[in-house]
Amino acid sequence: MCEYKKPSHRHGEHRLGDDQQFWPSTEIFRYIQRRQNGHHVGYYPRRLMSQFVARQLPGLLSEKEYALGDINKIFASHWASDRQVAFGTKCNKLIVMDLVSKQMVQIPSLQNSGQSSPADCPCGIHSIAVNFSRSLLATGGENTNDLAVYRLPTFDPVCLGEQGHSDWLFDIKWLDDEFVVTGSRDSKMALWCIKDDKDSDASTTSVSHIPMRSPDYGYDIVTPLTVKSCKKAEKVRALGYNHNNHEIAALSLNAYVHFWDAKHFIQKCSRKLTYPRENVCMAVCPDKGLYAVGSQSHVTLLDSRAPKHVGCIVSKQRGCGIRSINFNHDMLTIGTGAATIYFYDMIAGKYLELNCGHPCSLTAGKGWLLHDETYQDFFVDQEYPNAIYTHCFDNSGTKLFAAGGPLPAGLWGNYAGLWQ
């Protein structure tokens, strides 16, 4: 059996100091065990996750797969609490799932006022973002070119943003607790100001008791502060925000990354990517000032201060595409179109490995696939692993939610799993 191999440190590589090794392995397992048993954990979770733990954890994770019914492809997800995850689907549903009880609640989509036109051929929810104080959640509305904002933890509607985009809303990033940026398939970026006068702590209503909203609205209709075209961009696909230098990065499908000054909402420059195919996801490591872009077979590392890319990581599964990407401390997690998550150690400069030399990876379960006429006519008797369209760690960094569905556009299906 393959066992996890501890990363070796070559000359010049980062080593953990005594202060970083505060949590020995026995304390780590005690923390996880107490949490799983429902006991109060007095530790501050972030303190637990030293660089040592981030490297050791992937080899210890096991999957718990969830049955989701007949929803189609999960494109976006975000932790709403320590046991709840919110996710958005291709069939335009916003769902909150309790990972312990497995209860799922569909949150009502926010309808527009009729003052804006819906996008052609709607394609679901592609982004979910939570502000810094974790009081507001932003995602797509009933029209896929509108911005819907909900109050946490109750998911009461706050407002619907209209007249910002004419095509699908692809990504959302909060700049602080009030200002949020959206990027769209219409090649434009919009800046919004979201005001919520109600105290989110005043209500203790459970998410399972959310009433359906009527068309006469129980929320405000807002418009963007400004909308600007992203120069040289053909469809803004993903956004990143570095809060250390107040910089926004916008990834476009024509293989450019565009850097913006967030304070003045002005485009500064654009960088052409070396690998032009299927650049669809991006992650930010603010402490290092790095942006990671996932393409068909590579991860490109960028720094806006450098004229060219500063590094490149070859995918372990070339050709199937990198569909989601995230940083967990100095660990880069890579979700592929072939149901696998890999872990790349940014300090060691290589993929995490098992003792046998194979890469440390997580392989998603089978999920659910609809055997409709399209499947029978074009895909029958073939295997289609689930693309990992989204994955995210919880605040402690010890639980990983991953989700997606079949990669071919014509197939209807879903996958969701918790790795812990």
Image (cartoon, rainbow, N blue to C red):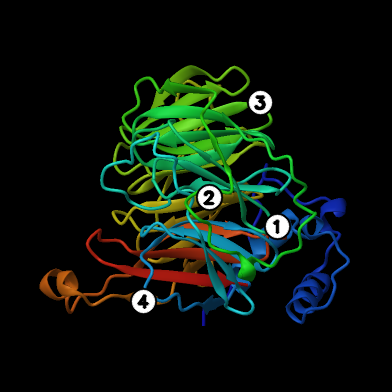
The answer to whether mark 1 and mark 4 are in CB contact below 8 A is no
Q: How crowded is mark 3: few (under 14 residues within 10 Å), some or many (20 or more)?
A: few
Query: Disc 3 residue type?
Result: Asn
Between circles 3 and 2, the one closer to the viewer is 2
**Res 28 seen here:** yes
Query: Disc 4 residue type?
Result: Trp
| Element assignment for label 4 | strand
> Disc 1 marks which residue?
395
Between circles 3 and 4, the one closer to the viewer is 4
Query: Disc 1 residue type?
Result: Asn
Q: Residues within 10 Å of mark 2 (few under 14, many from 20)?
A: many
**Res 331 seen here:** no
Q: In the rendered view, does 250 fall on the left or right side of 399?
A: left
Spatial CA distance of label 3 from label 4 is 43 Å
Q: In the rendered view, does 412 fall on the left or right side of 392?
A: left
Label at residue 128? 2
N-terminal label among 2 and 1: 2
Q: Which of 248 and 165 is in front in this view?
A: 165
